């Protein structure tokens, strides 16, 4: 089962039947999502949003399906090994949805507050819906009931292995870049649910109190409880927007001033554009994805902010040079695994290396858009040096007219541990201690500020 053998493509989860057992449609959708993401290497959030309408679930079942799928990816290494060890002859071939159904059930048994009998019984019902998996329903039943009996042992083994839920290539990459202790801390942090951060237009202390959160030293606000975002105070009025605390740092490095012309390249969904516009800059927000730019425009409209929005490929776009340029380049996104656990299982070293080539081309284009004396901030939400430190070393060798503008701790709330020896930002998921494990940490980001001489 390790690595999940691709199965034949199946249609999205069907609309619930009148005789469906309560809870079965949610499990059916979760298994379909798990299968689709692993087989096609597509994003989990987008897959859920695409499949939800056809599933016809109410809010409670939709939330359960999402929780099962997200948990399955957050703890996929533990789940797959636990199932593999209880399949004496390995996963049966030509068994249709057998693997994703067992994966979804194991996520419930091991990690979710779901009655064991419901997780097992509904999985067996689900196996019987497909002739290929129905042949192995008894086998699936035996495996899942063993997981129920041996849950404590499975969880103890997982806790003892910090990298159990991390693919080997990522564990090796982090070990090489950060050392064994830090690599283990990164992997451990990815097992926790992520915090929810917002960026406010003004007065973080006020909004921390109003929303029951805590004001972070960087200026972001972290919410203690998860609630419906659109129902929170200040949302409709456009007083704040959702943005990971680490993702809010790169725009701060530009220190945008009123009236400055600033280009935000690869701008969607627009959190950094909003930061720059809120500072009074004349922002040009550019992205090659028209659908993502529609979301950016909607976000700006709610916030009462304006920007020129351009649909174009930043690698080929021409314009008069800007006072400052922000390039949040496409990357492997390994710094976001805590929030998007599917990234660990859908990205490969080849993806990282391919994207590194794109980042270099985008950096070269961004250099031509930066005025003499102007600032260029480059960032990626990646933990991989190839997409961060090594990328800038190569850029400076190609562009001697640029130099670093080192970041001072005071610019990011005094968090000196997030600044490397070159004066660049390198946030790691286990940094930023909070009141609890869930309220600690932030995304893994690399950001550098470059000055054109």
Image (cartoon, rainbow, N blue to C red):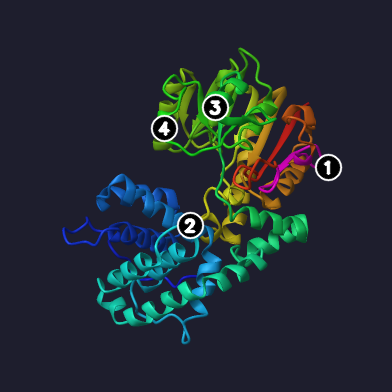
Residue 71 bears which disc, if any?
2
Cβ atoms under marks 4 and 1 closer than 8 Å: no
Q: Which residue is mark 3?
A: 273
Q: Residue at x 46, y 21 (%)?
A: 238
Q: Work out whether residue 266 or residue 200 is closer to the camera in this orientation and state it.
A: 200
**Which quadrant: the C terminus?**
top right
Mark earlier in primary sequence (4, 1): 4
**Segment colored magenta:** 417-431
Q: Is residue 166 above or below residue 82?
A: above
Label 4, label 1: how far apart the Cα atoms are: 37 Å
Mark earlier in primary sequence (3, 1): 3
Q: Residue at x 70, y 41 (%)?
A: 432
Q: Work out whether residue 30 or residue 258 is closer to the camera in this orientation and state it.
A: 30
Residue 420 percent location from the top left of the image? 79, 42
Crowding around mark 3 (Cα neighbors within 10 Å: few <14, some 14 to 19, many 20+) is many
Residue 135 percent location from the top left of the image? 29, 82
Label 2, label 1: how far apart the Cα atoms are: 36 Å
Q: Is residue 241 above or below residue 174?
A: above
Label 3, label 1: how far apart the Cα atoms are: 28 Å
Residue 295 bears which disc, if any?
4
């Amino acid at each position: 089962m390790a690595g999940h053998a691709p199965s034949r493509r199946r249609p999205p989860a069907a609309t619930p039947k009148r005789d469906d057992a309560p809870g079965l449609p949610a499990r059916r959708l979760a298994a379909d999502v798990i299968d689709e993401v692993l087989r096609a290497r597509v994003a989990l959030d987008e897959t859920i949003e695409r499949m939800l309408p056809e599933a016809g679930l109410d809010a409670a079942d939709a939330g359960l399906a999402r929780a099962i799928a997200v948990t399955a990816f957050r703890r996929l290494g533990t789940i797959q090994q636990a199932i593999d060890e209880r399949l004496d002859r390995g996963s049966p071939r030509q068994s249709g949805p057998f693997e994703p159904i067992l994966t979804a059930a194991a996520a419930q048994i091991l990690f979710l507050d779901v009655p064991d009998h419901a997780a097992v019984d509904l999985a067996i019902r689900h196996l019987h819906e497909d002739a290929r998996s129905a042949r192995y329903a008894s086998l699936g039943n035996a495996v899942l009931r063993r997981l129920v009996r041996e849950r404590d042992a499975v969880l103890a083994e997982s806790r003892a292995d910090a990298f159990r839920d991390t693919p080997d290539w990522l564990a090796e990459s982090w070990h090489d870049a950060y050392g064994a202790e830090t690599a283990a801390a990164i992997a451990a942090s990815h097992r926790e649910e992520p915090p929810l951060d917002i960026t406010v237009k003004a007065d973080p202390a006020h909004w921390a109190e109003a929303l029951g959160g805590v004001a972070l030293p960087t200026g972001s606000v972290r919410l203690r409880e998860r609630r419906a975002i659109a129902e929170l105070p200040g949302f409709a009025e456009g007083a704040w927007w959702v943005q990971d605390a680490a993702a809010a740092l790169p725009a701060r490095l530009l220190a945008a001033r009123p009236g400055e012309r600033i280009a935000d390249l690869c701008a969607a969904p627009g959190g950094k554009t909003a930061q720059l516009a809120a500072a009074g800059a004349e922002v040009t927000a550019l992205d090659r994805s028209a659908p993502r730019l529609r979301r950016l425009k909607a976000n700006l409209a709610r916030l009462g902010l304006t920007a020129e929005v351009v649909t174009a490929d930043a690698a080929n776009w021409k314009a008069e040079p800007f006072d400052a340029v922000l390039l949040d380049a496409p990357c492997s996104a390994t710094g976001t695994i805590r929030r998007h656990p599917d990234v660990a299982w859908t990205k490969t070293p080849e993806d990282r290396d391919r994207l590194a080539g794109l980042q270099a081309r985008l950096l070269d284009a961004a250099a031509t858009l930066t005025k003499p004396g102007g600032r260029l901030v480059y960032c990626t939400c990646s933990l991989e040096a190839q997409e961060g430190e090594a990328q800038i070393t190569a850029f400076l060798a190609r562009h001697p007219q640029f130099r670093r503008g080192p970041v001072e701790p005071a610019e990011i709330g005094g968090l000196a541990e997030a600044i490397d020896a070159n004066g660049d930002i390198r946030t790691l998921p286990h940094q930023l201690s909070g009141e609890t494990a869930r309220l600690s940490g932030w995304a893994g980001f690399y950001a550098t500020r470059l000055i054109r001489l």
